[in-house]
Amino acid sequence: MDLFEYHTENTFQNQKPLAERMRPDNIQSFMGQEHAVSRGSIIRHAVENDKIFSMILWGPPGCGKTTLARIIAAETASCFIHFSAVLSGVKDIRTVIEEAKKQQNIYQKKTILFVDEIHSFNKTQQNAFLHHVESGLITLIGATTENPSFEIIAPLLSRTRVITLTRLSRDAVSSIIQTALTDQEKGLGIFNLSLSDKALNHLIRMADGDARAALNSLEISAQLAISKGIKQIGLEIVENAVQKQSLRYDKDGEEHYNLISAFHKSMRGSDPDAALYWLSRMLTAGEKPLYIARRMVRFASEDVGNADPFALRIALDSVDSYQLLGSPEGELALAQAAVYLATAPKSNAVYAAFGNVKNLVKSTGSLPVPFHIRNAPTKLMKDTGYGKGYKYAHDYKDGYVPQEYMPEELKGRYFYFPQDQGYENTIRQRLETWRNIKNKIMQ
């Protein structure tokens, strides 16, 4: 075996994956989260003074949560236990607690318990940590990609500090890739490989802010280049190594709600370009198209309303069109509806009126229906006064006659106030005329 073959075998077969080997082992070399680890930050202060506190590291995949936890443990005098919430249960938690007691009683050492994917623990499992975090037996560092507000029980959340880590920037991912490519000890430096600018940009774009994904793709690209005897990794090799970008999206988690919120608010803000962007983001990431269509039907009533009554029909038609055509053809109907809704005149008058009425009904209860608008199908009901004095609107000029339709306690109350947008302006003018007539006569 020659030197090249020896290095190849050692690097790609006998060693850990590149992403694991390239984890920084000190806080100075930790890249991409300067807001969390720079001088003066609470984490940097805690590490330098060996005063680690319980925390939840919250951020997207590949942003450095596990790496940061290991660095914290390595630079303190504590016992470090790595715990996977996906693979462990309450029994394993008890074992960890016993080990922490041993470290405290025999070796006078603190225990840092790192719980990866802590959101995977149910309430009972999270409660099992509570007393021991509060007593100081363990210092808990949890890592999660999910919003702690939704996934971590309130008592545990109140005893920890949430540290938000962000999606890595292009510059940070670029630096991580270049370091791995040239590092002689842990990286790929022994192969003297280089990356073309196009290949580097493609790796960065496909990683989507995920350092682990970037390094995994680089490692596969390097393997392909070495197998072909090529020293420069070009775009074609990287494209072969990375077949498809995996957009960050959890259909049951926070990112799901973030994207649908961005879509809804873009349409509400009359920005068809942004609406199309967020629509495409969701469809590309695998969101169910009919879920998006249902949200547009809701939007048509909530945000467009009677300013353009036809908007609801367009939204409903997009549902029918997608059900008929499926993907990808039916997605165009969704795009058409999104653009129509974004560019339609807006009014939330119906939405606001209905919300106010629902609150009023809850507070006032079952107010009696006025006798003159009650149904009177029997003689007894007519004799009792049901329907007495009712005026049939079609018997009057313009099909309108002023009379009271509200319960006695709510006489003169108005809830719907049409805006001067689109067709609702016509409704507003008509309603003002009717209300003025009614107010004069009923006073």
Image: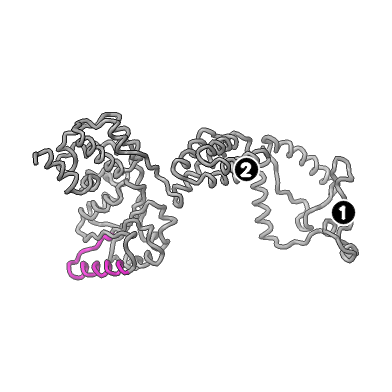
Observer able to see residue 179: no
Q: What residue type is labelled 2?
A: Leu
Reading the image, the residue beneath label 1 is: 390
Tell me the element at label 2. helix
Residue 142 screen position, x and y as percent? 33, 57
Query: Residue at the location (40% across, 63% down)?
Result: 122
Residue 407 screen position, x and y as percent? 78, 57
Q: Which mark is residue 382?
A: none
Residue 213 screen position, x and y as percent? 31, 43
Q: 166 above or below 365?
A: above
Q: Which of marks 1 and 2 is nearer the N terminus?
A: 2
Q: Which mark is residue 316?
A: 2
Tell me the element at label 1. loop
Residue 101, quarter of picture: bottom left
Q: Mark 2: give few (<14), some (14-19) or many (20+) Cα within 10 Å.
A: some
Residue 279 screen position, x and y as percent? 50, 39
| Prevailing secondary structure of the magenta residues | helix
- Bounds of the magenta segment: 91-113
1 vs 2, front mark: 2
Residue 120, quarter of picture: bottom left
